[in-house]
């Protein structure tokens, strides 16, 4: 039941990020950081002062939307979007989690959800597919070129030889 509530909360905040501005050339990002106090009581923190949560977003392109929700302490999240009309969301519930979501392409939708403590997840999405990446890549990746060496290999297309008509026919 609690994971459903957390998922619905993440979807709600992602929808807020998507509904931010009507102009298609605007990129949108939304960050919510909360910390626990005492026995699980939570209160919103508009600035990360007093917490060790950290998040960053880099968006290059048009129409991208990013959302980061952090509930807990000592979490780190990064979203990098290179392209057009991408939607990315990271939800961290717990402590000492690290996540990196990188999207390089167009019309990609991705999410990382971490519930618990001491988790690490890195995901790269391209038009070729998805692959796991080191979470440290978010700290160093500033351009699309920086991440493309981690992209899945381009699948080789099978070459079909066309039979020549009229040759070898009896």
Image (cartoon, rainbow, N blue to C red):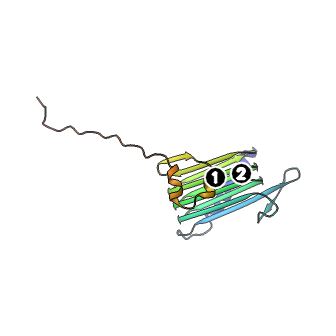
Q: Residue furthest top?
A: 170
Residue matched to label 1: 136
In the rendered image of this protein, does residue 91 appear above or below residue 163? below
Q: Nearer the viewer, residue 129 or 1?
A: 129
Callout 2 secondary element: strand
**Label disc, if present, on residue 14 of the rendered structure:** none
Residue matched to label 2: 92
Instruction: Name the front one of labels 1 and 2.
Output: 1
- Circle 2 crowding by C-alpha within 10 Å: few under 14, some 14–19, many from 20: many
Question: Which residue is drawn at the image coordinates 69% and 50% (left, top)?
Answer: 98
In the rendered image of this protein, does residue 75 appear above or below residue 170? below
The quarter holding residue 28 reads: bottom right
Q: Residue furthest left?
A: 170
Sequence-earlier tag: 1 or 2: 2
Q: Is residue 84 visible?
A: no
Q: CA distance from mark 1 to mark 2?
A: 17 Å
| 166 relative position to 136: left or right | left
Residue 93, position in %: x, y?
74, 50
Residue 82, position in %: x, y?
53, 60
Q: Is residue 151 visible?
A: yes
| 14 relative position to 51: left or right | left
Residue 32, position in %: x, y?
72, 60
């Amino acid at each position: 039941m609690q994971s459903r509530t957390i998922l619905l909360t993440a979807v709600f905040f992602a929808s807020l990020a998507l509904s931010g501005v009507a102009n298609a050339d605007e990129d949108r990002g939304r960050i919510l950081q909360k910390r626990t106090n005492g026995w699980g009581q939570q209160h919103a923190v508009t600035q990360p002062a007093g917490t060790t949560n950290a998040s960053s977003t880099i968006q290059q392109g048009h129409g991208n939307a990013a959302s980061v929700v952090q509930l807990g302490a000592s979490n780190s999240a990064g979203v990098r979007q290179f392209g057009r009309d991408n939607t990315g969301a990271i939800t961290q519930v717990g402590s000492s989690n690290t996540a990196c979501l990188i999207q390089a392409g167009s019309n990609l939708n991705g999410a990382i959800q971490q519930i618990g403590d001491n988790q690490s997840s890195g995901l790269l999405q391209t038009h070729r597919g998805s692959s796991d990446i080191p979470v440290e890549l978010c700290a160093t990746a500033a351009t699309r070129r920086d991440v493309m060496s981690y992209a899945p290999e381009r699948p080789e297309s099978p070459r079909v030889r066309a039979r020549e008509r009229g040759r070898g026919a009896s």
